[in-house]
Image (cartoon, coloured by chain):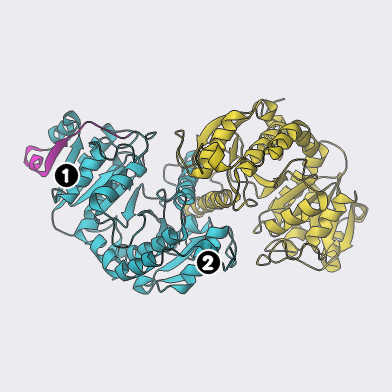
Chain colours: A yellow, B cyan
Amino acid sequence: MTRSDRSPHGGRLPSGVARIAVDLLGGDGAPAVVVDGALRACSADPDLHLVLVGPQQSAGEVVGALAVGDRERVSVIAVDSVIGMADSPLRNIRRETTVRTAAEAVYTGRADAMVSAGSSGAAVAASAHVLGRLRGVRRPGLAAQLPTERGPVLLLDVGVTLDATMLELVQHAVLGTAFASVGLGIARPRVGLLSIGSEPGKGDRLRRAVSIALSDIPLPAGGHYVGLVEGFDVPRGGPADVVVTDGFTGNILLKGIEGAFTASRGGSKISEVYGTRPHEAAVLLGVAGDVVVCHGSAGGAEVADGIALAARLHRDRITPAVAGIADDLLTELSSAGGLTIRDALGERS
Amino acid sequence: MTRSDRSPHGGRLPSGVARIAVDLLGGDGAPAVVVDGALRACSADPDLHLVLVGPQQSAGEVVGALAVGDRERVSVIAVDSVIGMADSPLRNIRRETTVRTAAEAVYTGRADAMVSAGSSGAAVAASAHVLGRLRGVRRPGLAAQLPTERGPVLLLDVGVTLDATMLELVQHAVLGTAFASVGLGIARPRVGLLSIGSEPGKGDRLRRAVSIALSDIPLPAGGHYVGLVEGFDVPRGGPADVVVTDGFTGNILLKGIEGAFTASRGGSKISEVYGTRPHEAAVLLGVAGDVVVCHGSAGGAEVADGIALAARLHRDRITPAVAGIADDLLTELSSAGGLTIRDALGERS
């Protein structure tokens, strides 16, 4: 199977109903943008069913705009509470919120996957809490796909692991490799670690330790560690299919690349400069369920893109496949979790 | 004085001879690219004198390509040793290298400023060691200028402080503010701290602590802290004139933005899409001398750009002016250097 056949956003959708829980109150433009995205997604995919989680009125706008015969594809869970961007994602985890309720819809089997454009911290906390993590996984990671001239690049983590540990980065390398194989159809994924130069030893202490660890472990799906890669290797592609970094750096790099594409287009005064830009939707890896997090600034088209991605994750059974090929290694790494950066670097205490 | 009058790369150069030490062996394309850059710089600026540091043969190529009457503008210090990208910048600091010899030319007064496109770690280590740091400065910071539609953005640090401390970031905010004022002509610079969201409290522990510290100190030159900014605020401009981050994140963001501009242009099949891209030359702030570090992948035009920037730093007496307005605050911060992130966040030990 070639790479393009498995492209998550292009080509024919596999048949089969997919029921996606959608957080109507997530995102800067919610609920209007999410309503728009839900309608676009329904119109693009006749086998898509939506479980709309949010205010009854907003859900009613979606239902009202659909043809009468399509209305049975939509159900509603009425919830009014939202987690704001400035709130701690953990503070409200036990309160009823749209993002938590969406996760519960997946947990109870009412939906097959979920999408939120709200605070990614809240989406990660709620889905990890409600759905649980894959066995052995310390912290989930958000993986963004960037199309480049040299093929797709999977960048992770883009926002979860702010004070990342060595174990988290190594586990994300494993999860990213597995996803690149089963989700992007990349045979024997090449895995790079983001740093400030490509020569061995470049980077901070965390990078030096993780690089040593990645050289030692057998990655799943025939994946192999190619060493350090640099910031430009993410938008340009080339040396690695999977680029691993901490959530702080990954988030800033992803937004910087997006901003540069926007600035480059805006100044060009031409509507269509270049097709490649990061997808607005990131996949949450390491959680026991299909979760897609859209950019807070996503528009309707990007929310629809996220819903389509969630449907594909479910139809292609990506998460069980990732768990299947990564489980042994994740568990083994977790039980060796006491390994410190100091150990890896061979430093004396 | 308006912003454009003080643009470091545009407009009329102030008169007065500037003698720039140039590391002929620094950079991926050295020495050919540096020879090309030296010739371009000489041709653009009749008051420019060069002290070429490197192999006699490469220096001879520069001299041979100049008109006979211009040859007296070039002198040579013959050195053959270079620090490779994979070498530790500290390992060879006492050996004779081109970058160290260039710094010594500035220290002894044979040159007014220096330029290297070699390993930035080696350039920083050599210049800080030979020239010394400004009083109170813990670690120098490399500052890159990015032109945006909303005015220039100064991003620092882009490669020195890999495992950065709170004090280093706060001092870089002070140095960056002073440079934005005297070097970029920005009145009352707005200073932002790079993080993963703009809401207060977003980010890792280092960012939360630095944000608290920056809210408390009076920045020089009427500068003021505007809070957290995001990755896209660097290529797009807008909320801040000076964006402070650690050298790991800054390096990766800068290269990611460069890569995105390249990818965007390459795909457009149009030669001139948008004029804004990061300058290839970064200014080293916090060292007692004028030091410019070019990108390792710089071409001849970018090396010439770096030489012109170094000449302007000298002619406009930027480094003494930065030291003058930042000295008190840097010294005061340094003596409070025992303040830890834990203290700033009010955590119990």
Position in image of residue B216 (x %, y %): 47, 73
Is residue A185 visible in the rendered image? The answer is yes
List x then y, in percent, for residue A249.
Answer: 55, 50
Is B309 one of the magenta-colored residues? no
Span colored in magenta? B67-83
Q: Residue at x 82, y 49 (%)?
A: A131
Rendered image quadrant of residue A121: bottom right
Q: Residue B15 appears at what percent x and percent y?
A: 15, 58
Q: Which residue is mark 2?
A: B343
Q: Residue B87's quadrant in the figure?
A: top left
Determine if residue A193 is in view: no
Nearest the camera: B189 or B337? B337
Q: Give the CA distance from mark 2 to mark 1.
A: 49 Å
Using the image, name the chain to which the residue with label 1 belongs.
B
Question: On screen, A262 above or below A234?
Answer: below
Taking the image as shown, residue B279 lies to the left or right of residue B273, namely left
Q: Residues within 10 Å of mark 1 (few under 14, many from 20)?
A: many
Residue type at mark 2 is: Asp
At label 2, counting other C-alpha atoms closer than 10 Å, the crowd grade (few under 14, some 14-19, many 20 or more) is few
Residue A141 in picture, x, y percent from top left: 67, 46
**Residue B70 falls left or right of residue B271:** left
Q: Is residue B255 left or right of residue A108?
A: left
Mark 1, secondary structure of its residue:
strand
Hey, what amino acid is under mark 1? Leu
Dot 2 lies on which element?
helix
Q: Which residue is mark 1?
A: B50
Q: Are marks 2 and 1 on the same chain?
A: yes
B56 above or below A28?
Answer: above
